[in-house]
Image (cartoon, helix red, strand yellow):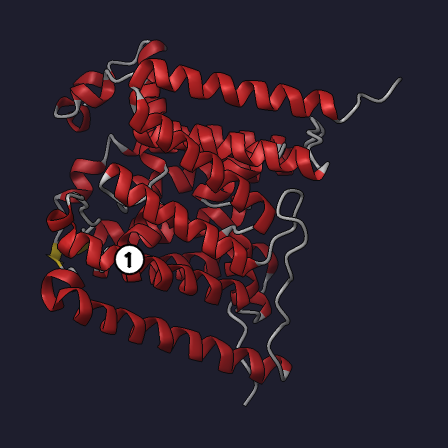
Amino acid sequence: MPQIPKIVPLTLVLAGLVGLLISVWSASGLTLTLATCIGLFAGFALYHAAFGFTAHWRNFLSAGRGGGLRMQLVLIGLVSLISFPLIAYGEGFGVSARGSVAPVSIGVFAGAFTFGFGMMFAGGCGSGTLFTVGGGSTRMVVTLSAFVAGSIFATLHVPWWRALPSGPRVGLIEEAGALGGLFILFAILGVIAVLSIKREKALFGEIEPARETGSLLTGPWSLLAGALALGMVSIATLALLGRPWGITSAFTLWGAKIGTAAGLDIANWPFWQTRQGWLERNVLSDPTSVMNFGVIGGAMLAANLAGRFAPTLRLSWSDVGTAVLGGLLMGYGARIAYGCNIGGFLGGMISGSLHGLVWMLAALVGSALALKIRTGRGFVMAEK
């Protein structure tokens, strides 16, 4: 069978991306077309830098290597240098930007724990699921489908979770101002980074060398390059849409539309009775949806440029089972925890919200338990 020239799938991908941008422009205009472009860049960067949270957290928990986790802290720090002043003083410069500040609650802890547990079975997080789908992983298509199903199922229970005892909404910007909030945030990030470095040195005697960037077009990228690129994505999203980057609310909308088309009376569920406008919205008029489409498309472009786009339908029952389990748990957990690793963790932290830190800790605990169940190896401690 003759091999298809690489230019053919690349041309098809480019044509599809142009079609996506034209469709969004026709449905929603300039702002969401720009949001789609931001998503495209995010997917491109996520793929080339392999900047998924799941693998880096797995390496930190069960292998003792913390470089990926520390680069996530670098990403938070870089974005916060811009996001804190923008949220605090943006109105004075004509930029209306609000942070993602949520109460510390049982729902946040339970949801993040469930999400962290699920992503170790799924093999991807919120952003990781999207960019690996774009990269050609058919297993992650199963994960994404289950993610959507878990998201809509969770809306049946969101009112119950919200009614449980909850702490206050604590935002560093509101409590200490932009400068004071930054000082507190950097102190927290610094402590986490130092502890991870000490642990890694105790286990291995040295820090793992960082991967270098190859080609900007064909990859691979270093984690630092990925952090810089995703930092730009986060800041651009905050400036353009007036709120932090998010992913999983779109999955909930997709699930609601699919469920409605299948005959479910979702519009009368308590969660949706106050969200009729959102439910009736065209997905091409939903900012999070078009950014997600962009992430998938950007990753598909990156994979084709790298010559690694090669989907396969050969999946074992184990692959399918873990993908479904992980996706359902992530979808459910993200909905009750105000988002996934992007919306709940990254979005919360760059907004100075205490719930972002709680989200991270709870998700790490859930991830460690899942790894213990799957591999028999939990959190690796350095020998004294």
Q: Please, which residue is most extreme toward the front here?
A: 93
Frontmost residue, 324 versus 125: 125
Q: Is residue 23 in sight in this rendering?
A: yes
Q: Quadrant of residue 173?
A: bottom left
Q: Residue at x 31, y 24 (%)?
A: 30
Against 370, residue 290 (above or below) is above
Disc tally is: 1
Against 157, residue 60 (above or below) is below
Q: Is residue 316 in sight in this rendering?
A: no
Q: Residue at x 17, y 64 (%)?
A: 178
Against 25, residue 359 (above or below) is below
Q: Position of residue 216 (x, y in %)?
A: 62, 47
Q: Position of residue 62 (x, y in %)?
A: 56, 66
Q: Quadrant of residue 24?
A: top left
Q: Please, which residue is most extreme toward the right here?
A: 1
What kind of residue is marked 1?
Answer: Ile
Side of 19 relative to 137 (left or right): left
Q: Residues within 10 Å of mark 1 (few under 14, many from 20)?
A: some
Q: Position of residue 11 (x, y in %)?
A: 65, 21
Frontmost residue, 40 versus 117: 40
Frontmost residue, 175 versus 129: 175
To which residue does mark 1 refer?
82
Side of 326 relative to 360 (left or right): right
Looking at the rendered structure, the secondary structure element under dot 1 is helix
Frontmost residue, 265 versus 21: 21
Q: Residue at x 30, y 62 (%)?
A: 81
Q: Quadrant of the N terminus?
A: top right
